[in-house]
Image: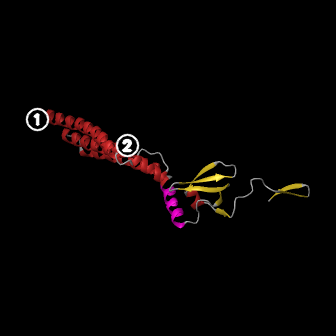
Amino acid sequence: MNLAITISNFSIGVFLILFGLLLGKIVNNVLKSFLSRFNLNLFFSKVTNLDIKLEEAISLITAFVVGLIFVVLGLNVMGIATVIINIVSGFILILIIIFVALAVKDFLPNLMAGIYILSKKSVNEGKFVKIKGIVGKIEHIDLIETKIKTLDGEFVLVPNSQFVKNAIFILEEMPNTKPKSKKKNGSKKFK
């Protein structure tokens, strides 16, 4: 009788695991289709100027969580010790936290600096600035980065956190493109 219960529990556990993986795949597809109706990727791209597939990320994480829940349920029904499940779940959670922390380590400071710059309005589009050796006109400021047109006509994207971390020189007008030189004691000096 004990063997029959073990086989039954094992069969139910395997069924739950397979069902959870299948359900996770279905949830992934349905949620991706549902979220695409709201154009989250386009909205997020316009707001942050980053090409991150937000719809896919949300649907994939949700599918992973659904699958994980059923895997844990299946292993629990099979009689696998709860301690092992907790250790594996804790390890996966730590990996997810590390991944998220590494993914947003540059994003969050730039976002906060972008909000600060846009709300303080000390640096505006159309102003001429010098920051970290880059001299040019601010063409566009968004939440993550600022687009500057240099003296050479090239565009440089400066992360907004640089505006908070470094000295910014706000210039009254566009500097000369060629430095003026004066001869003094036979040597050239630049103004």
Disc 2 designates what residue? Answer: 56
The residue lying toward the viewer, choosing from 186 and 91, is 186
Say whether residue 109 is magenta. yes
Indicate left or right for 37 with 153 as reference: left
Question: Residue drawn 35% across and 44% down?
Answer: 36
> Is the residue marked by circle 1 packed among few (<14), some (14-19), or many (20+) residues within 10 Å?
few
Q: Where, by quadrant of the figure, is residue 78 drawn?
A: top left
Q: Which residues are magenta?
A: 108-120
Query: Does residue 119 lie above or below 15 as drawn?
Result: below
Indicate left or right for 76 with 56 as reference: left
Please indicate, yes or no, whether residue 187 appears anywhere in the rendered image. Answer: yes
Please indicate, yes or no, whether residue 64 appears anywhere in the rendered image. Answer: no
Quarter holding the C terminus?
bottom right
> Most extreme residue toward the left, as rendered?
1
Q: Main secondary structure of the magenta part?
A: helix
Where residue 41 sits in the image (x, y, percent)? 41, 46
Task: Report helix, strand or loop for mark 2.
Answer: helix
Disc 1 designates what residue? Answer: 2
Task: Report helix, strand or loop for mark 1.
Answer: helix
Indicate left or right for 13 with 108 as reference: left
Where residue 23 sits in the image (x, y, percent)? 25, 39
Indicate left or right for 185 with 67 as reference: right
Question: Residue drawn 47% across and 51% down?
Answer: 46
> Is the residue marked by circle 2 packed among few (<14), some (14-19), or many (20+) residues within 10 Å?
some
Say whether residue 37 is magenta. no
Q: Amino acid at mark 1?
A: Asn
